Amino acid sequence: MPPRDKSATSLASNKSFTNPFNLSLAQLHANVDTPVYYVGVDVGTGSARAAVVDQTGSILGLAERPITRWELKQNYINQSTTEVWQSICYCVKTALSQSHIDASLVMGIGFDATCSLAVINERNDEPVPVGPDWSAKEQNILLWMDHRAGNETDIINATGDKCLKYVGGKMSIEMELPKMKWLKHNMPKDEATGKSLFESCKFYDLADYLTHRATDKETRSFCSVVCKQGFVPPGVDNSAHGWSKEFLEKVDLPELVEDDFRRLGGIPGKNGTYLSAGDTVGPLSEKAADELGLTTDCFVASGVIDAYAGWVGTIAAKTEIPIPSLNKQDAQFNGIDRACGRLAAVAGTSTCHIAMSKDPIFVQGVWGPYRDVMAKGYWLAEGGQSCTGALLAHVLSTHPALTQLSTSAEASGLSKFDFLNSRLEHLKKTKGSRSVVSLAKNFFFYGDFHGNRSPIADPHMSAAIIGQSMDVSLDDLAITYLGACEFIAQQTRHIISEMEKAGHEISCIFLSGGQCRNGLLMRLLADCTGLPIIIPRYIDASVVFGAALLGAVSAEDAIKARKQNSSKKNSSTSLSRKVSYQDLNATSPYTVPTATASLTSISAMAAANFAPQQQSGHFPFPLMTPIEDESKQLQIPKDNSSDEDNDGEDEEEIVSFGSKTNTQAKFTDKFIKDNHLNATSNPRTINASKPTESKSNERSGDKLWKVMETLSGMARVIVPSSDTDPDRKLLNVKYKIFLEMADEQRRYRSLVSDIEDEIKQESTAATTSSTTTVTA
């Protein structure tokens, strides 16, 4: 069977599409059959990504390009804004080319990035080197994971300033103000002025730098400055300007106070503009539009930190079965109020846990609460696990049976995790175990290998294992892996428990990231927390999808601007330029896209699968198996299409444990029965009736929420088993042991610390006594 014609994704193939080139702009946007598109840009630690999204929330194109990370000295980790921007331009153009759309129809673009510090020269807007090699002028980003500013962090935290209570009680070494302080005391002189290079700098969180580069505006986002730079929104705790003159002078940074905090973005409403997520910064500048392959009619949304884009891209999804708590919430509240109580868990190497509330809620070991970062007047809290994906990788890579696992998994055509899950099912049968979970009933794994971020907030926490034998077989690796998965789930429960004790009401967990494909981990998360786990439409692309949703919010302003422009001047001049995908390919300064893992497994799959799924009503770009029929509930089959259809990329089982079990379906049936629900009539579907929302009273957060609800699509649900289920009972007991292991570790360290202090005091006293005797 020959491969499908990828031109099937072009606008011309859409029978309801009216050629935009034959319409005036007013007609273009009055015509409901004319599509509008949005672009999302995500800059991670190791790569930049861009996605093109349409009005249904379907990803039509996705591209990724690696970015360099320099570590010239231990804990000194740099990147380059120049390279980051070039990578973004490459990805946007490539994604547009894959999408086969006209660039003039892209009306909004959103950016997210890691919380890294970008340093720029105020005079010429050029990069300023951040050391330790001061001649490396392109290296002007201190990456979030740069840890050079340890002493500066301690000095800042010693002030006890009120701003610190809004970042979890103390600033992290990963935040940006300590990095600025380090730069002040280590930068050389500026050759042009003879003054310290620091005095010529202005500072941006990376996401804010990207919106600056895109618009030439100095607008900052509340998300960046509140979460990572010590900004306390005006009106919070008697804050007048957001920035504190007294605090900055106390930490020896008076330069940042100059001209009403000019270098940091200024005072809100005076010489500075600060926006919540999705609020419009302005249109693309001519230069940025040209570099990105877009037009100046595309509007730029205020950016966010990457994890927060994951929040945007997940928590408004509709669920394939009714969730009572969400149904109740939707019936009672309108707009952004519906976001409260939904925990977004953005999982990767580590996991961030983000929850919104109407009022400030302080939680031990959880960053925040942060006001205005996602919606004006609302607060967010951010917890986190130091290592989750990294933990599972570590367990596999350090076990003696790794080679055997790799060989066996490859021979079976499975991923290592899928193979281990199957191995555990096999062990359950051969050992006559009650369940897979009970295989590890006497194995107690505590996995804080990289310290604890939440809720203990102790960087000195470490790992501990009780019940380990000298067995080094593949079966032992499977049990150890099971213990690590259980630890991740129990620690998630610990974080949620502390948040709920403080006042949060968590109703469900919206999870994203590759871990969603691990059926064992999903089952443990549901049963340990007792909460439904909701798997979004895009599990690997939820962050870049969230960035595109920000662009969709801003696009509303772009459409209004186009309509206004079309009434003032001839429509033929309103577009700065029209760029077809053929033009993009012809004018791109880059070579033919080099397939990264993401391009191979995601974008190629999108192109191959889009047309038939569009015709059948399924969602394009299926990063998870499409939802074909609600009556099938949660039995998610593997994709049985031909090899030509899926380009060899099989979808992984994501909710059932083991490829042939119907465990999840049983849980779902009972969940629906216990809650007197109808599985085929979910009030949370796209066309469901909801409380009437007043447009006249629409807040900026409501505008964002409306876009999120409209475009997020359908999500799958993993429901917890009943409270009386034997595995739930076992996991509840092991949670108590988990807490005891954490407490005992700290008690052990305290005992050792006490005796070491006592020994030190005795040694000092003996030395003093000896000196006194000699002197006498």
Image: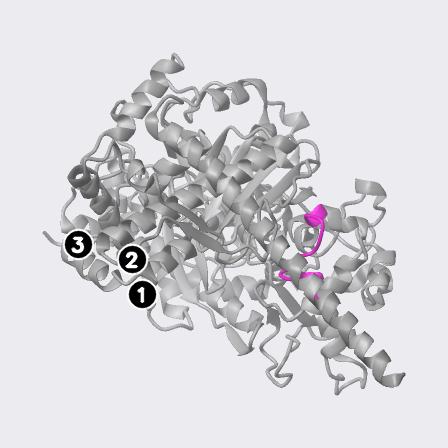
What span is colored magenta in the figure? Answer: 166-180
Q: Which residue is depicted at the point 77% across and 54% down?
A: 272
Which residue carries the number 2 mark? 470
Amino acid marked by disc 1: Ala
Q: Residue furthest top?
A: 676
Mark earlier in primary sequence (3, 2): 3
Question: Mark on residue 413?
Answer: 3
Residue placed most toward the observer, 618 or 345: 345
- Give how far across and how far down residue 376 sits, in percent: 69, 38
Amino acid marked by disc 2: Met
**Left or right: residue 126 compared with residue 294:** right
User: Considering the numbered disc 1 on the image, is that residue within a helix, a strand or a loop?
Assistant: loop
Mark earlier in primary sequence (3, 1): 3
Mark earlier in primary sequence (1, 2): 2
User: CA–CA distance between discs 1 and 2?
Assistant: 43 Å
- Give how far across and how far down residue 211 sits, in percent: 61, 58
Question: Looking at the image, what colour scheme do you see?
Answer: one colour
Q: Is residue 336 above or below residue 512?
A: above
Q: Which residue is depicted at the point 57% across and 18% down?
A: 332
Amino acid marked by disc 3: Gly
Which image quarter: residue 234? top right
Label 3 close to label 2 by CB (< 8 Å): no
**Left or right: residue 660 compared with residue 714:** left
Can the viewer see residue 742? yes
Which residue carries the number 1 mark? 595
Q: Residue furthest right?
A: 776
Instruction: Answer whether residue 613 is magenta in the image.
Output: no
